[in-house]
Amino acid sequence: MTQRGLLIVLSGPSGVGKGTVRKAIFEDDSVDFRYSISATTRKPREGEVDGKDYFFVSKEEFEEKIQAGGMLEYAQYVDNYYGTPKAFIDDTLASGRDVFLEIDVQGALQVKSKMPEGVYIFLTPPDIKNLRARLEGRGTDSPEVIEKRVAAARDELKKMINYDYAVENDVVEAAVARIMAIIKAERLRVSRVLAEIAD
Ligand code: 5GP
């Protein structure tokens, strides 16, 4: 029997830089885990590609997929749905490959309740002031949306207790190195190594 892949979940407050860290991880060609592309009802930002950055779908399509049990988790965030298609996760883990999710805190907690064997990594901002500056600097959201995101981030920070690891996003390369070290160590857990030897 093939050893199941490792589920790696990167999460944290919005604006903390999850997307940037995730992109930096996948820029490295030697990365041997698969990225789970989320579905969303929000409109694509400039340069975003359907089927690469997200699956951009309508609200109706998204709700149908929820009804059909096709979402491992989903969350409503700033008036849009975001969710993780379930089939890709199941198939990839069953084939023995590791899967990497980058999702918000609501979603990560849902995944954890279903798949507690995963590795849950919380990315933290160096400070909350920095978070606001980052959102403002990105220039993609209105002041009202920024206020909503900052308020949501304060609540999310309180949820760090539910995670296995906390990684500070001070410098992107440093955060990436910490995450890769976590994944390396998790693959060497005795329970995983023993299961492989037993195959
Ligand atoms: P953005 O609109 O900036 O791409 O993403 C907004 C938030 O949604 C980010 O915190 C991002 O991590 C989160 N997100 C992206 N995909 C998913 C998903 O599939 N599920 C959940 N729960 N959150 C997601």
Image: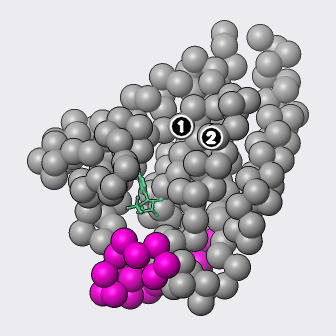
Residue 139 on the magenta span: yes
Which residue position holds label 2?
26
Q: In the image, residue 124 lies at what x, y percent?
A: 66, 72
Question: Is 82 situated left or right of 32 in this image?
Answer: left
Mark 1 vs 2, N-terminal side: 2
Q: Mark 1 and mark 2 in contact? Answer it, CB < 8 Å.
A: yes
Identify the residue shown where x is 80% and y is 52%: 177
In this figure, what is the number of numbered marks?
2
| Quarter containing the N terminus | top right
Mark 1 or 2: in front is 2
Q: Is residue 159 above or below residue 10?
A: below
Q: Does dot 2 land on a helix, a strand or a loop?
A: helix
Residue 199 on the magenta span: no
Q: What number is the disc on residue 35?
A: 1
Is residue 161 in view from this perspective?
no
Quadrant of the rendered image containing residue 53: top left
Identify the residue shown where x is 24% and y is 56%: 43
Marks 1 and 2, how far apart at CA: 8 Å
Q: Quadrant of ligand 1?
A: bottom left
Identify the residue shown where x is 26% and y is 45%: 56
Q: Is residue 75 above or below residue 54?
A: below
- The region drawn magenta spans 136-161
Specify the amino acid type for callout 2: Phe
